[in-house]
Amino acid sequence: MSFPADFLDELRSRIRISEVVGKKLKLIKRGREFLALCPFHNDSKPSLSVVDEKNFYHCFACGAHGDIIKFTMETEGLNFVESVDKLANLAGLEVPKQDPIERAKEARRRTLREVLDEVTIYFEEFLRKAPTKAGLDYLKERGLSDKTIKSFRLGLAPANSKTFRMDMQGRGIEEKLLEEAGLIKKSAASSSTYDYFRGRLIFPISDRRGQIIGFGGRALNNQEPKYLNSPETSLFQKGQILYQGQMTGEIAHKTNQLIVVEGYMDVISLAEVGMSNAVAPLGTALTEGQIRELWKFSTEPIICFDGDSAGMRAAVRACDRLLPMLEPGFSARFASLPPGEDPDDIVRRGGANKFRELLESSTGLSDFFWETEQSNGSLDTPEKQAAFFKRIRKRVGEIKNQTVREAYKDSIEAKIINFRASMRAVTSGMAGPYYGHSRSNPYKSIRSSISNKAARVNITQIMERRQKQAILAAFLMHPSLVEDFGEALGYLELGDPFLDKLRLDILDIHADGESVNAQYLKRRLFERGYTDNFEGVLEDKALAHIAFAGPGVAIQKARDGVRELLSRIGKYQLEEQIALATNAVMDDLNEVNWNRLSSLRAALVSVNGGSNLEDPV
């Protein structure tokens, strides 16, 4: 019994290979791949590689190799049909019935692919031999070389409403097939037919196997709409396809960077300047199917839509669609373009380096989500702020994956704390006015919010630095805290040269073995060139806002305060370092690697308040 190739492709695209293998084996993250003990031979060291981007597993020891279907067959003792049926249930797909009618439909689809490939050649040829050179001139004006035009198989459709259809008949392609392929349409006013892509530049659209399944067409005059896609057919469902997804995948996998732009010409213009790692949705907001496709190529694609109101709205819709779907290790970033410009404008004016600069300043999904929600109305009263907190917490609750949801809750609560602190600073005259926004034009507000990002980030950075100063102030006032949190302090990176030097000097003085009290610690630090207030760390104004760090505070209160801040600032740093150290132990179980892992785990236990962790190996 066989299944249609399109159905099997869709099945494989819906489920990542790591999901299937991960239900049977413990996976170890290695960059963008996973390793596991191979179940197909007596494996003592992980030798099974699992690659989501290519949707296969491979054992470097015994040579076992396959996809989700083969793995299910081999590990569960199921035959091909049973495995497909089980995986289809997991993916939420209906298994097609394998009767003569279905087989005929599959044969018809194969015929349509042949037709579409023939039509692509026709459009390519017509671009060169058309009565006018308007199509070729337009592409040249956009800066495209002959090599790029040929690589993307760009073409042109005749302007006359019947020329294409008549030329196809001359090549022996019947009208019914052209209609099924979405190349001709029936008139609404009569039973006559007309060519669908008249006088338009043609952009062939491929499936995951590189086979042409449809076309995009761009008007060369004032024809509306400006862009037109093939209608939905048995081959072409635009909500599941990315323009140039098949061509871009391997490059994006190698560079670990995937750019998502709005249109065909943006993708092609970037390729022209050597950036061949861009894809585009087909004139729609990103769908769930397209997001899954993106994550096959990159764990954190950069969404870079046009710098106009429509582009901003599309970016916000993409964020809304992404948020509930987030999974550990899979997210997105957002790059903001200057108002009114698109990627093609950027590279034509400033080249690839200018565009790369914009990508480097992209915003993570968490920050983009916070900013867009924050800009959706004025926040100038406590009631409005409370409504904002309620709204953003509710949105976070929509994240389906529990691990990601909990991480977002922590992140959002930290942002809310910083927001409240910045508002207190405003009311006490320590900062300028906060930014409130009118509801009359929310997308203008979003742009305003993002353009003023530097000012808001400055307030956030000030508050974060004060929190880090508070930790060190507590250690200066209560040196015995090193006994509780010395491990954590040793691994914590504060991101500030002065604070990091002070942190390491405090630990270094303790390492001398002397009995250290506050007076002794300060004297030793003065000998190393520090001033009385340690560049603001022990200023009276700063200490007034740190209830747990004063000289007369009970040690338990100081301990609780430091633990809370270390958990907020350093917990994720420690978890990331533990993951790396665990991998190192898996690779080479020696004394150095094991001691580092044990030390990191002890640091995290102290930050978590003594909670136990499972042994990683």
Image (tube, rainbow, N blue to C red):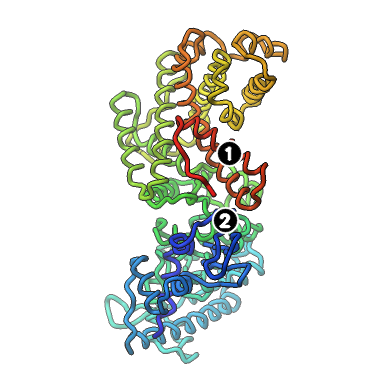
Marks 1 and 2, how far apart at CA: 26 Å
What kind of residue is marked 1? Ser
152 in relation to 602, above or below: below
Report which residue position mark 2 lands on.
32
Discs 1/2, front: 1
Q: In terms of depth relative to the viewer, which is nearer, 88 or 463? A: 88
Q: Quadrant of the N terminus?
A: bottom left
As drawn, is 210 to the left or to the right of 24? right
Counting from the top left corner in percent of width and height, residue 108 is at: 40, 85
**Could one spot residue 202 in this view of the protein?**
no
The answer to whether any part of residue 334 appears in the image is: yes
In-front residue for pair 614/414:
614
Q: Quadrant of residue 596?
A: top right
Q: Residue at x 56, y 71 (%)?
A: 154
Residue 129's spot in the image, x, y percent?
59, 79
Q: Is residue 520 left or right of residue 563?
A: right
Residue 81 image-quadrant placement: bottom left
340 over 135 or under it: above or below: above
List x then y, in percent, for residue 395: 33, 42
Q: Is residue 365 above or below residue 460?
A: below
In terms of secondary structure, where does tag 1 sit?
A: helix
Q: Are marks 1 and 2 in contact (CB under 8 Å)?
A: no
Judge by depth and name the residue closer to the eye, 559 or 459: 559
Amino acid type indicated by mark 2: Arg
Where's residue 177, x and y in %? 40, 85
The number of callouts visible is: 2
Q: Dot 1: within a 10 Å radius of its alpha carbon, few (fewer than 14), some, or many (20 or more) residues?
A: some
Q: Residue at (55%, 53%) from the top-left corner?
A: 29
Residue with the mark numbered 1: 598
